[in-house]
Amino acid sequence: MPTEERRLLTAHDLYLFHLVSQPQISPRGDLVVYCEHSVDEETEKKYAHLWAVPVPDGEPRQITHGKQSDTNPRFSPDGKTIAFLSNREDEKQPQVYLLPTDGGEARRLTDLKGTIEAFSWSPDGGRLLLQFRAKDAEQIQREEDEEKKKLGVVCREIDRVFYKEDGTGYLPHERRHLWIIDVQTGQAQQLTEGSVFDEWDPAWSPNGEEIAFCSNHADDPDLDPDAIDLFVVAANGGEMRRIPTPIGPKSSPSFSPDGCSIAYYGHEGRAEGWKNTRLWIVPANGAGKAHCLTCEYDFDVSSWTINDMGSLPQVVPIWSKKGDEIYFQVAHHGNTVLKRATLNGAVSDVVDRDGVVGVFCFDGEQERLVYFHGDMKDPGQVFLKDMATGNDKQLTHVNADLLEEINLGQIEEVWFKGAAGNDLQGWIMTPPGFDPGKQYPSVLEIHGGPLVQYGNFFMHEFYYLAAQGYVVYFCNPRGGQGYGEAHSKAIWNDWGGADYDDLMAWAEYVSQRPYIDRKRMGVTGGSYGGYMTNWIIGHTDRFAAAVTQRSVSNLISMYGSSDFNWAFQEEFGNVPPWEDMENYWRQSPVKYIGSAVTPTLVIHSENDMRCPIEQGEQVFVALKRLGVDTKMVRFPDEPHGLSRGGRTDRRIARLRYISSWFDRYLKKEV
């Protein structure tokens, strides 16, 4: 369809997009399975189903059906069975099901009460290893007793510091533990237990005799969150064996094919979140030192590139079949790419084009690689790479018809100089039908985190605002990841410093474009981006309107009230407020709110446990007292991530509030 005949993207299109995730390839390399997610507009329920593609030349076909969510498919080692999670029998309690790949009905394997957070097949295909957190006994009793269920929770007894989690709610007293499930009988065996320690990211050894995992065995793990170690336990239970590694956060252990080494992600040191996550290996018997394979490279081993159309899980390190290379994701310069490292630390690219690589996996012989890839123009598809030729083939074309009828406008990537002469990367999105001879209102978007990056990935919100006639521009100021450790560390204990300077340099750079109306510039951001929006309105009147979302405004009252709890102090001198109140106050936007004159819309979710709603309330009340035009929009039952995963009608309402606020101030005659 010619571009000029295409329609504009709408908020309602959130109902029409289907999203793909979790591609997996069979051990023989002849079948790819993935999830396709959709929303029922009438009920607001979200569903997911499994689809299969024979490779290399088959067509996708749906293999599970119904009003349910079927997710996390995993092929058995012989390729004859797919294990997956489904809530088909109980909407609130997913279980593991097994589906024959040659056809037939899925059968339920587990009967557990709690949250199955991860699972994997044993090498012989006879067992499943689960990371599982059981419900508390009192919760089970309440759910089974109709009268108690009607009355609800009487009270909550809290005995640990980290007792809640955004998007999850109040945590049970039960901890995450490892379980083994017999595939034939469904018999469940709890492998680890305890009321103080969690175990997570379990991985089988190649012979199926041992399991590696992460755990924090500090006296009080909540008060020493970076004291994470690697452990190994026999698959039939017994004593845990700690593997010595440098102190610091760790995740995703993965055995080498010979079982002699374990790869993992992490960095060295406590309370130093600005450091790059790196790839390490350590002898599995604990007899040698851990060795970092990526320390010579100033990049972050992670999958983080912000978007509002799905998640980008970080995949565990995948060893080559010979055990001489390891595959992993890297977030760098606005992309998430796939790399590999040799055991002597030589790193090379596997998938490095603009965009993001999500879940990836190999067939048994590692001749074929299947992976998720999305970019600025497509929220994501499944691709197949022939490892011998390097050729890529797109296996899915989900949303192709929808995208064909929409004019998204144009995007320009630029590099410019920040306030300190530093190199910064940004993007400018112009409205569909853009006329360079006209002047347009504009919106500066600021990302959350701050230890993340914007980049070459589809952002529905940005396209929506562009469709409303705005130039939308965004960049990665200092303080985020993707540009090296110095870039990340620049605002450590100095929020509102280098980041503010870079954002103002970016706004100035864009304002010099002849098509930008300097009197009609707006600003918005969520989470840390909301923090920066609050900071901006207290430090400049440059913007004619602002929208602050799920924001941080007062670091003093934030202490202990977020699900991140006291650990926020690590970014602010690593001392609590009562030891350095002025430092917290110096970096709190509400300190400067008295200078604000910018009309500001405040958006917050009432179940936000990351940035509690009192942070937004303080901004709203202050602006009201100051006589600055403001309004507060609150979303009930929604967590911090409303814009990405909230109920669709609420996501749509949020977008319309944002655009109407900007329309009010940026589209009027000045």
Image: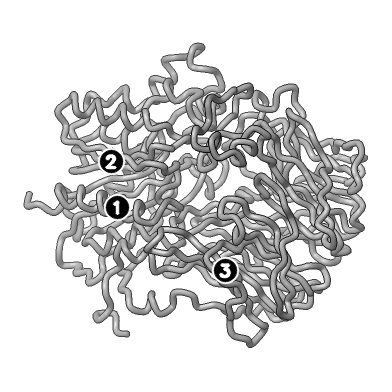
| Inter-mark Cα distance, 3 to 1 | 27 Å
Q: Quadrant of residue 513?
A: bottom left
Residue closest to the far bottom: 57
Image quarter in which the N terminus is found: bottom left
Q: Mark 3 or mark 1, which has the lower sequence index?
A: 3
Residue plotted at (53% across, 71% down): 381
The image quarter in which residue 271 lies: top right
Q: Is residue 588 above or below residue 415?
A: above
Q: Classify mark 3: helix, strand or loop.
A: strand
Residue 482, position as x, y percentages in the image: 53, 50
Q: Which mark is residue 653?
A: 1
In the rendered image of this protein, does residue 125 appear above or below residue 627?
below
- What's the amino acid at mark 2? Val
Q: Residues within 10 Å of mark 1 (few under 14, many from 20)?
A: some
Question: What residue type is disc 1 on?
Answer: Ala
Q: Residue at x 49, y 37 (%)?
A: 150
User: What residue sits right under mark 3 in the picture?
Assistant: 49
Label 1's element? helix
Mark 2 vs 3, N-terminal side: 3
